[in-house]
Image (tube, rainbow, N blue to C red):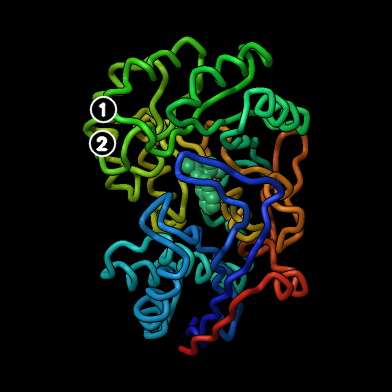
Amino acid sequence: MKITGVELRRVAMPLVSPFRTSFGTETERDVLLVKVVTPEAEGWGECVAMSGPLYSSEYADGAADVMRRFLIPALAALPDAGAHAAERALAPFKGHRMAKAALETAVLDAELRAAGTSFASFLGASRDRVPCGVSVGIMDSIPRLLDAVAGYVDEGYVRVKIKIEPGWDVAPVRALRERFGDDLLLQVDANAAYTLVDAPHLAELDAFGLLLIEQPLAEDDLVQHAALAKRLRTPLCLDESIESARDAAAAISLGACSVINVKAGRVGGYLEARRIHDLCRAHGVAVWCGGMLETGLGRAANVALAALPGFTLPGDTSASRRYYATDVTDPFVLQDGHLPVPTGPGLGVTPVPEILDEITTFREWIPA
Ligand code: NPQ
Ligand code: MG
């Protein structure tokens, strides 16, 4: 499979409601999509970088730049560009994992479409549907949070995660327990908003039977996460800190976490994401599939990944309408709290051309 060229596309997708985290408020998803063209098939990838470097150091314009200057030329030089060859060709370039993941995913999609194999079957999925959780942003008040969560529970979500930050943590969790009871699967995500000084305060969350607390401390501090984990009964989950299978191995050895949020974009692609799954499964560390407000393209790949046997906790694999009134693909619709794993070749979904064109803000063709 020789690459003919790559199309970069920026699309603007308004969110159905603002999404506030400890690092900011998003009202629109500004996404970079890539399409890899080969004589046999086309493949799609979605770059999960935000428009600004707030969740991680990567950002959409930076990802597009490193793709066009370095990553796409390296792929274009390959005589036979499968996903494994693509991963090897991109490895010499440091960092830029979200940019690499988007390209590797597009190459894999093209490869699998040509072979008639689905992402799920390529990755080793063991289920045909996955249970879905929902990530709920920081709200202006507790009544608003309770209303929002009630809506999601009514829709059927099997697990709720709320974003927390200093000043919005124990009280909202207590209110959720009072309103929805102890049976609601509930977890919290701090996106690195605390320091180890907050350990006694975070330990107050132990009273509420949370599934886990996600990324309480800085992304580059496994040692302090290990110290914090010893002081909490709530299982500690890492997100931003885990950028590779090597990071996951280090975190497990250090006792920095007992759960890992796997996001293929954050770790450089679905091949590395699967390695983290395999490593965690061997160590009895639970994994679940995170989300980055993906369009239907990224969502399809996430749902396939979440169908692997080691994904024992519900993921942030929400339905399209959690974020978007109109998705670029046929929407993912929740059925009894689950999403169906796509079965068609590759991602099993394609962008609807008219919708894609309508939301495109920038388009560039890079010939190989
Ligand atoms: C997390 N995702 O687990 C991330 C953070 C996040 C579903 O909670 C635009 C693009 C806005 C990516 C907001 C969820 C985002 C984003 C939050 C990612 O930490
Ligand atoms: Mg997170």
Pick whichever, 51 or 335, lies toward us. Answer: 51
Q: Is residue 308 among the parts visible in the rendering? A: no
Classify mark 1: residues with Cα within 10 Å, few (<14), some (14-19) or many (20+).
some
The number of callouts visible is 2
Q: CA distance from mark 2 to mark 1?
A: 6 Å
The x, y position of residue 333, in whole percent, is 76, 46
Q: Give the residue pinned by disc 1.
A: 226
Pick whichever, 219 or 141, lies toward us. Answer: 141
**Residue at (49% x, 58% y) in the render:** 50
Q: Measured along the vertical axis of the image, is residue 125 above or below residue 138?
A: below
Q: Amino acid at mark 2?
A: Leu
Q: Are marks 2 and 1 in contact (CB under 8 Å)?
A: yes
Specify the quadrant of the image occupied by residue 336: top right
**Residue at (61% x, 16% y) in the render:** 175
Classify mark 2: residues with Cα within 10 Å, few (<14), some (14-19) or many (20+).
many
**Image mark for residue 192:** none
Q: Is residue 349 among the parts visible in the rendering? A: yes
The x, y position of residue 91, in whole percent, is 30, 67
**Residue at (38% x, 49% y) in the render:** 275
The x, y position of residue 64, in whole percent, is 45, 73
Q: Measured along the vertical axis of the image, is residue 2 above or below residue 219?
A: below
Specify the quadrant of the image occupied by residue 146: top right
**Residue at (40% x, 31% y) in the render:** 237
Element class at badge 1:
helix
Q: Give the residue pinned by disc 2.
A: 222
Q: Measured along the vertical axis of the image, is residue 10 above or below residue 27?
A: below
Q: Residue furthest bottom?
A: 367
The x, y position of residue 345, in whole percent, is 65, 64
Asked if ligand 2 lies within 8 A of label 2, the reply is no
Q: Amino acid at mark 1?
A: Ala
